[in-house]
Image (cartoon, helix red, strand yellow):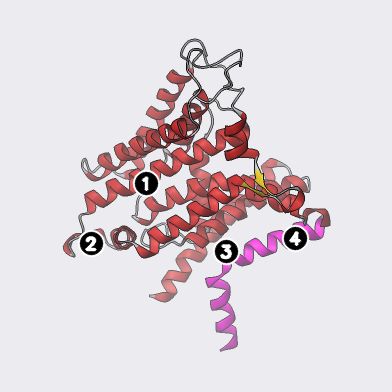
Amino acid sequence: MNTKKIQGFVTENAIYIVLAVLLIGIAVYDPSFIGLNTLRDILIQSSTRVIIALGVAFILITGGTDLSAGRMVGLTAVVSASMLQEADYARRFFPNLPELPLFVPVLIAIAVGLVFGLINGIIVSKFKVPPFIATLGTMVAIYGINSLYFDTEPNQSQPIGGLREDFTTLLGSGSIGSGDFSIPYIVIIAIAVCFIVWVMFNKTRLGKNMYAIGGNEQAAKVSGINVARNLILIYSIAGALYGLAGVLEAARTGGATNNYGNMYELDAIAACVVGGVSTTGGIGTVPGIMAGVLIFTVINYGLTFVGVGPYWQQIIKGAIIVAAVAFDMRKYASRK
């Protein structure tokens, strides 16, 4: 009986056990890994990734997928950065653009993400194109649009730099407090987004409908849920989250190019799967997604910290993804 309880506990909490083992293992190898500076760096690197993963999770829970997430992040990073350069910067994207209030380019970028998310939702719900194909097509199209925008005169595909200090400080490098105990603004924003998404998942009709659609779309239709309308809204929200992540990524790095966001969608999908979002839809939690993102950040940051090469990191990440899906299938099969 005790053995079954232990097995059940391990199966239910595998994600958190993996995260703890990773942290302990790296700390034993190099004790200097454990420190407030390291924790701060990990949280900063996780901030934009968790927002992208939350957007992807909306769609995965409905039983779909979104391959366009990373390219939306890249497009919105370029859009926001192009309008938030210093007035005296030599290579301004818009030489004659007056200095805009910070919130204007930010809202424009988020709106751009929302519009492309809306397009995804319409293609999937109204034209019945499978989400994999629909978002694959928009992924390619968005990259082309971003590249055309990035290549306009006078920029001509040059990396966008010279971003305004209020932008990079408030949404990127700035923090509350000082020293080791400072809390970066970008981390606070990410936590706030996680809380809002948790409320949406658990306390709203949209959240209940989302889980119902992912659990059984036909049953959801029979119960009176307008599946098409909910899918359009869900994809739009996901797009807005990608837009916010693109803005934060530009602020965090102090620049942008049309290649920003490349492959981010795969990291986000992997983090969701590792965090317990079922590959068949209908299941997923915000704490699990956050843990999944932290695991991959710890892998990237921690293994680099102790000198493990990038190729070995890819092998380890792949093994964790496969193990996570195996645990996922075993866990829900046992419940049945």
Residue 237 marker: 1
Look at discs 3 and 1 and give the one toward the viewer.
1
Residue type, label 4: Gly
Q: Quick one: label 3 or label 1, which is nearer the N terminus?
A: 3
Residue 25 marker: 4
**Label 4 CA crowd tier, 10 Å (few <14, some 14–19, many 20+):** few
Look at discs 4 and 1 and give the one toward the viewer.
1
Instruction: Quickly name the residue at label 3.
Output: 15
Residue type, label 2: Ala
Of 329 and 121, nearer the camera is 121
User: What is the magenta range?
Assistant: 1-29
**Label 1 CA crowd tier, 10 Å (few <14, some 14–19, many 20+):** many
Residue 160 marker: none
Q: Quick one: label 1 or label 2, which is nearer the N terminus?
A: 2
Q: For the point 47% across and 17% down, which residue is it?
A: 97
**Label 3 CA crowd tier, 10 Å (few <14, some 14–19, many 20+):** many
Q: Position of residue 10 (x, y in %)?
A: 58, 73
Q: CA distance from mark 2 to mark 4?
A: 45 Å
Q: Quick one: label 2 or label 3, which is nearer the N terminus?
A: 3
| Secondary structure under the numbered disc 4 in the rendered image | helix
Give the quarter of the image for residue 224.
Answer: bottom left
Residue sitting at the far bottom: 1
Look at discs 2 and 4 and give the one toward the viewer.
2
Q: CA distance from mark 2 to mark 3?
A: 30 Å
Residue type, label 3: Ile
Q: For the point 48% across and 26% down, which residue is it?
A: 100
Residue 239 is inside the magenta segment: no
